[in-house]
Image (cartoon, rainbow, N blue to C red):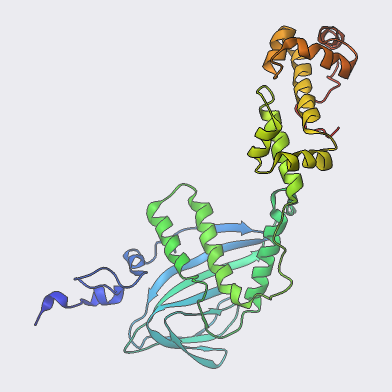
């Protein structure tokens, strides 16, 4: 008898052979089965608070029975290996690798493992409650979309069909991702673990999402976005040579298209906007620094300082020196916007 090819009981549970690599993708989770259960995982997603009670790979004994019981929280069961059966509110179902089902809140269920092909089950047991606090979503940073998606997911979980389903969106892989995060103790652990748990919930709920009425995917107004990118680039680099061609390349549009964007979004031309930003910076330095006018001109993109004088006087009706005398001694606020986006 060739004992080199035999499989030990422990290797059989892990789906491994001495002569080859692990065949069971979740075998590594058996190294520390309760690792994730020991973590105090709590987080907020949208308008809900989540508390993870259990997240592990459970190994059933052949023929093992778990008598009828229920939970006040949500508990997902993913069959990673083996066979068995479950009774959900009086309805029996066969279980096999690749299926999953949800029990709870308050779903009475019974589980039984196959005597010949025992189950290994990935379990996520979590409490989901409305989050406290009066602060609502901040649309400026996408909170409204997150709140809508969280609410939609929780509603799907509340109406989850009481029967097993195929894990077509591979939610099971996120259990392994969560375990690897625990093994590696990576920077940003809490944020990454939160994302893994949310992925399990979203992938499990996804088959039952309606085809219509989903939260809208955020889409940019590309002309406005490109104007913002171009104007910010000009503000950041106003002291350097700036051309329409160069800035257009930075925002990935043609020079002609960028000129159109400045007219429609900024009600100005590219050249006028660059001059506007440079003059704002010049004004700030005239009031706040002791640099000479020539130094200030060179600092803010006027390669020939003499060019600044007629441009400045045409804009303000006075020379840079007169402007400094007028506003610096009095301490009055600078009347021309400084490094703020202004659409003339």
Image quadrant in which the C terminus is located: top right
Q: Residue at x 35, y 84 (%)?
A: 118
Pick whichever, 288 or 255, lies toward us.
255
The residue under the point 33% across, 89% down is 115
Confirm whether residue 224 shows in the render.
yes
Q: Is residue 287 left or right of residue 111?
A: right
Residue 290 seen from this side: no
Image location (x, y in percent) of residue 21: 26, 68
Q: Position of residue 146 (x, y in %)?
A: 67, 58
Q: Is residue 1 above or below residue 172?
A: below
Residue 117 sits in which quadrant? bottom left
Q: Please, which residue is most extreme toward the right here?
A: 317
Residue 199 placement: quadrant: bottom right
Is residue 263 placed above or below 330 in the rendered structure? Answer: below
Q: Position of residue 42 (x, y in %)?
A: 55, 58
Q: Residue at the spot x=72%, y=45% of the render?
A: 225
Q: Nearer the viewer, residue 188 or 106?
A: 188
Number of labels in the image equals: 0
Task: Establish if 24 lies above or below 308.
Answer: below
Question: As drawn, is 120 to the left or to the right of 134?
Answer: left
- 274 sits to left or right of 88: right
Residue found at x 63% / y 61%: 49
* Above or below 23: residue 252: above
Q: Is residue 129 left or right of residue 27?
A: right
Please state, as top left, top right, bottom left or bottom right, where the N terminus lies in the image. bottom left
């Amino acid at each position: 008898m060739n004992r080199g090819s035999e499989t030990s009981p422990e290797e059989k549970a892990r789906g491994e052979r001495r002569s080859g690599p692990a065949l069971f993708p979740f075998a590594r989770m058996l190294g520390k089965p309760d690792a994730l259960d020991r973590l105090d995982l709590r987080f907020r997603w949208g308008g809900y608070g989540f508390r993870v009670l259990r997240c592990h790979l459970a190994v059933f004994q052949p023929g093992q029975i778990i008598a009828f019981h229920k939970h006040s929280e949500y508990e997902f069961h993913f069959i990673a290996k083996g066979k068995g059966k479950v009774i959900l509110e009086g309805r029996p179902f066969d279980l096999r690798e690749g299926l999953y089902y949800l029990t709870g809140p308050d779903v009475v269920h019974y589980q039984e493992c196959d005597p010949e092909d025992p189950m290994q089950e990935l379990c996520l047991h979590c409490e989901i409650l409305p989050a406290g606090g009066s602060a609502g979503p901040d649309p400026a940073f996408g909170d409204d979309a997150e709140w809508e998606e969280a609410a939609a997911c929780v509603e799907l979980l509340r109406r989850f069909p009481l029967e097993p389903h195929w894990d077509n969106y591979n939610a099971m892989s996120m259990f392994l991702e969560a375990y690897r995060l625990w093994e590696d103790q990576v920077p940003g652990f809490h944020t990454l673990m939160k994302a893994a748990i949310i992925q399990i919930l979203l992938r499990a709920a996804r088959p039952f999402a309606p085809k219509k009425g989903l939260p809208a995917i955020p889409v940019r107004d590309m002309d406005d976005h490109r104007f913002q990118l171009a104007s910010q680039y000009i503000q950041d680099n106003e002291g350097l040579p700036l051309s329409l061609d160069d800035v257009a390349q930075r925002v990935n549009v043609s020079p002609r298209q960028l000129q159109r964007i400045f007219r429609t979004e900024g009600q100005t031309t590219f050249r006028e906007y660059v001059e506007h930003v440079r003059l704002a910076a010049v004004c700030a330095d005239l009031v706040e620094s002791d640099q000479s006018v020539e130094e200030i001109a060179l600092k803010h993109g006027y390669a020939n300082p003499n060019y600044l004088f007629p441009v400045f006087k045409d804009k303000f009706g006075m020379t840079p020196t007169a402007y400094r005398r007028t506003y610096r001694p009095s301490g009055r606020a600078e009347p021309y916007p400084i490094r703020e986006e202004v659409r003339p």
